[in-house]
């Protein structure tokens, strides 16, 4: 692996976790973000589940796009094929969690099947079949894998931070009109503003790509 490849992977990872966080910057995957962030345990479980599905989906979709959809000129089926792959992986994950971690399966409830419709996962796999903005070239397999893992870590980080805040808010003296989702929305907005500060790191990415 060349130095430029390593630098590209570092840039992709920093951007996916902090600068272009799917939840707090791109505002994707908000349904599970608000739905399971009431407790740290369920938030961590959901984050790990999304990270798993996101990573495995990338491995499969990247190869299908590169070796099937593009060569046979049927890339217009990309979204449908990718959703089918994600849905299949979620069903597989659901069976595993029901068998080995029933407590976590019950805690996630309806939000586990909703991973199928999590637009953050679909967004990652589609981005990974496009152009790497740091190199100007299509994502390599390693770069797409790094992007999916880092995006999953960013999603997990956002969930854990939000769960920590909401657990503290449970014992805080909050006006009744703001209790529940209203204060959660306000907290998420403040978190998004905080993550906006990481956009200053973009000079590193831009400088490395030149």
Image: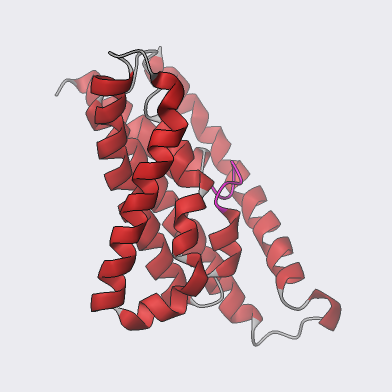
Q: Quadrant of the N terminus?
A: top left
Q: Residue at x 40, y 68 (%)?
A: 44
The foreground one among 91 and 10 is 91
User: Does residue 191 appear in the picture of this structure?
Assistant: yes
The foreground one among 168 and 197 is 168
Measured along the vertical axis of the image, is residue 169 above or below residue 184?
Answer: below
Q: Is residue 1 left or right of residue 171?
A: left
- Residue 159: x, y in percent? 50, 62
- Residue 174: x, y in percent? 77, 81
- Residue 145: x, y in percent? 28, 37
User: Does residue 131 appear in the picture of this structure?
Assistant: no
Whether residue 27 is in magenta: the answer is: yes
Q: Residue at x 44, y 50 (%)?
A: 154
Q: Residue at x 36, y 16 (%)?
A: 135
Magenta stretch: helix, strand or loop mostly: loop
Labels in figure, total = 0
Q: Which residues are magenta?
A: 23-29
Whether residue 56 is in magenta: the answer is: no
Measured along the vertical axis of the image, is residue 4 above or below residue 127?
Answer: above
Q: Quadrant of the C terminus?
A: top left
The foreground one among 205 and 93 is 93
What's the coloring here?
A: secondary structure
Measured along the vertical axis of the image, is residue 156 above or below residue 103?
Answer: above
């Amino acid at each position: 692996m060349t130095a430029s490849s390593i630098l590209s992977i570092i840039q992709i990872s920093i951007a996916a976790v902090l600068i272009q966080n799917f939840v707090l910057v791109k505002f994707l995957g908000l349904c599970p973000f608000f739905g399971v962030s009431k407790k740290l345990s369920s938030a961590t479980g959901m984050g790990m589940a999304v990270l798993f599905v996101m990573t495995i989906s990338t491995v499969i979709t990247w190869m299908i796009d590169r070796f099937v959809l593009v060569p046979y000129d049927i890339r217009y089926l990309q979204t449908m094929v990718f959703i089918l792959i994600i849905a299949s992986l979620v069903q597989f994950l659901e069976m595993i969690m029901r068998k080995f971690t029933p407590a976590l399966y019950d805690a996630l409830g309806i939000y586990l099947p909703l991973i199928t419709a999590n637009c953050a996962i679909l967004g990652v796999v589609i981005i990974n079949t496009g152009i790497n903005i740091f190199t100007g070239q299509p994502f390599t397999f390693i770069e797409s894998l790094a992007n999916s893992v880092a995006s999953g870590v960013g999603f997990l980080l956002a969930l854990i931070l939000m769960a920590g805040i909401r657990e503290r808010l449970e014992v805080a003296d909050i006006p009744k009109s703001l209790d529940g989702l209203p204060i959660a929305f306000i907290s998420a907005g403040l978190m998004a503003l905080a993550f906006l500060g990481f956009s200053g790191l973009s000079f590193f990415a831009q400088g490395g790509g030149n």
